[in-house]
Amino acid sequence: MDPQKVLALCREHAGAEAEYDVERVLATLVAQPRFEFFPLRKHITGRASIEKFYREQYPKFGPTVAGYEVIGEWTNEIAALQEYTIDVTEADGSTTRYYVISMMPGDDETGLLTGERLYCDEGFVRALLGPLFDLLQPIV
């Protein structure tokens, strides 16, 4: 894929997430997206699971984000990468800063994103997925 198209899709995806616009988020993804989490080496795959996350869990996670900063963006014909710090308010009122790298591969055939590969701490994955954490499957 054209590197600028991959980056534009990545930004559209993030913008739709920020506005809780599930239809726009899903429109950036292939029919069967896969979200992977490293170093956990776990994934959640399929349109139904990803849609459930965005409709049920993401609206609960979003308000816990106390702030974030995009540290950098990079792209090539394979994927776009975004590096962030994300500050999450914990149940006890404290704030935890997480360092996250999101790699969003593009699919040449559809012109959409195949999903995300998130490189982050387990605490962030648990905060992001909430009860859906238990749906994660091992990457083999």
Image (cartoon, rainbow, N blue to C red):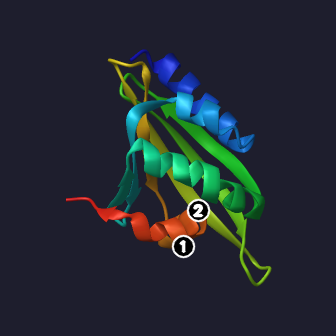
Label 2 amino acid? Leu
Q: Which residue is found at the position 41% from the left and 25% from the top?
A: 76
Quick one: label 1, few (<14), some, or many (20+) residues within 10 Å?
A: few
Rendered image quadrant of residue 59: bottom right
Please give the residue where the numbered disc 1 appears in the rendered image.
123
- Disc 1 from disc 2: Cα separation: 9 Å
Q: Position of residue 72 (x, y in %)?
A: 59, 40
Expressed as whole percent of the image width and height from the top left, the position of residue 129 reads 54, 63
| Quarter of the figure with the N terminus | top left
Check the image and name the residue furthest to the top.
2
Above-or-below relation of 110 to 116: above
Label 1 amino acid? Gly
Q: Which residue occupies the foreground of this view, 36 or 20? A: 20
Tell me, yes or no, if residue 22 can be seen here: yes
Q: Does 17 appear above or below 96? A: above
The residue at the far left in this view is 140
**Residue nearest the observer in this picture, 75 or 1:** 1
Closer-to-camera residue (124/27): 27
Identify residue for label 2.
128
Q: Residue at x 55, y 54 (%)?
A: 53
Left-right relation of 40 to 11: left
Q: The residue tagged with tag 2: helix, strand or loop?
A: helix
- Under tag 1, what secondary structure? helix
Instruction: Specify whether residue 124 is in view.
Output: no
Mark 2, other Cα within 10 Å: few <14 / some 14–19 / many ≥20 = many
- Give the residue displayed 66% in from the left and 44% down from the top: 70
Among the two numbered marks 1 and 2 on one chain, the one whose residue lies closer to the N terminus: 1
- Rendered image: mark on residue 19: none
Which of the 4 quarters of the picture holds residue 64? bottom right
Residue at x 66% of width, y 42% of height: 17
Q: Is residue 30 left or right of residue 102?
A: left
